[in-house]
Image (cartoon, grey):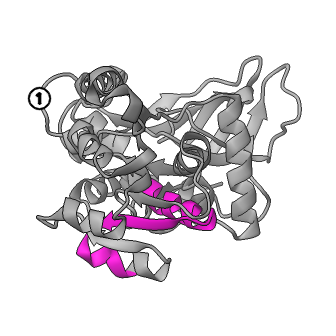
Amino acid sequence: MLVRQMELSGLGGPERLVAREREVPAPGAGEVRVRVEASGVAFAEVQMLRGRYPMQPRFPFVPGYDLVGRITSVGTAVTGLAPGDRVAAMPRTGAWADEVVLPASEVVPVPAGVDPGDAVALVTNGVTAWQLAHRSASVGPGQTVLVHGATGGVGGLLARLCRQAGATVVGTASEANQEALRSEGVVPVDYRSPDLTERLRRHAPHGYDAVFDHLGPRSVARSRALLARGGRVVSYGSAATLRDEGGPLRPYLRMLGGLLWWDTLGEPRLTRRRRVSLYYVRPGRRFREDLTTVFGLLAAGTLTPVIHSRHPMSRAADALRELSRGGVHGKIVLVADQERAV
């Protein structure tokens, strides 16, 4: 059976995204076939267009980090899943298609009555935010934390989870998005301020207990200087290195070099209490457990994503352009074209 896939044909801009008709096989043993209802648009795809995402596939390939859809058929040896079940998954590539085949072990049930666009906005971003707040940094009452990019797809959810955990949250954002942060109880700071570091220090004169940084090595070094004793920077991306030269792994190698220096030479051993750690969302058992937890919060109305915009899958290039321009508040989502949503 031929299905449409949105394919990145090479380096460049969103115009390199083209629709192709491809054969998708029947599910094999331990696999399910899923009709995609919604897929997320992530900064990873912007990086892939420039060849800046670590270990991305060779061109041409189908992007799409995560998806929500209905199972249409199951292979042999699949138990607990049936056609008609709505599930979510994080394949990391391949989700921008009308139908996909996935290992049954990698899909997570989606609660009944949940909008597929809302659900997909929490697959990668929701688990990332949950794990940053509760596994990487153990945010709790009385703490003061800093979230860079606090109106982004991950940052917005992370700021809310930290607030729910009882922390005071300071968030960087553009001036246009600051009122949205105030309405959620987050202290906004304009990331374009020439005296950004001093502004951030004013809100935590004794230092931050945690800083969540998605920008890259230079920003992480500045973030570390803002920590309280015993505080932690969690680095989970390199967005500011999009236009850098060199291989896509270079920012992470620099980060690892910085970690080694800080841990061995950066401070006298007796006063070394400010830590930096790297985070990367990974599939597996813990991912599935945490996504189930996040979906429970969504179903209960405790954690709802902000959807910046929704585009039909056929207009995926427009979604990429919108994300590339910046200023996005929340998550951009692709939804199935109406004529194909059968």
Q: Quadrant of residue 19?
A: top left
Q: Determine the residue positioned at 48% across, 29% down.
A: 22
Q: Can residue 312 be spotted in the picture?
A: no
Q: Is residue 248 left or right of residue 295?
A: left
Residue 25: image x %, image y %?
62, 23
Pick whichever, 138 or 99, lies toward us.
138
Q: Is residue 184 left or right of residue 317?
A: right
Q: Is residue 249 above or below residue 330?
A: above
Predominant SS along the magenta part:
helix
Pick whichever, 277 or 308, lies toward us.
277
Q: Determine the residue positioned at 45% across, 46% down.
A: 231
Residue furthest right as drawn: 80
- Image quadrant where one finds the N terminus: top right
Residue type at mark 1: give it.
Glu
Q: Is residue 241 left or right of residue 238?
A: left
Q: Determine the residue positioned at 48% across, 39% down.
A: 65
How crowded pointer 1 is (Cα within 10 Å; few <14, some 14-19, many 20+) is rated as: few
Q: Determine the residue positioned at 26% across, 55% down.
A: 321
Residue 69: image x %, image y %?
65, 48
Q: Is residue 104 above or below residue 90?
A: above
Q: Is residue 173 magenta?
A: yes
Residue indicated by mark 1? 245
Residue 253: image x %, image y %?
28, 21
Residue 40: image x %, image y %?
48, 50
The segment highlighted magenta reads 153-179
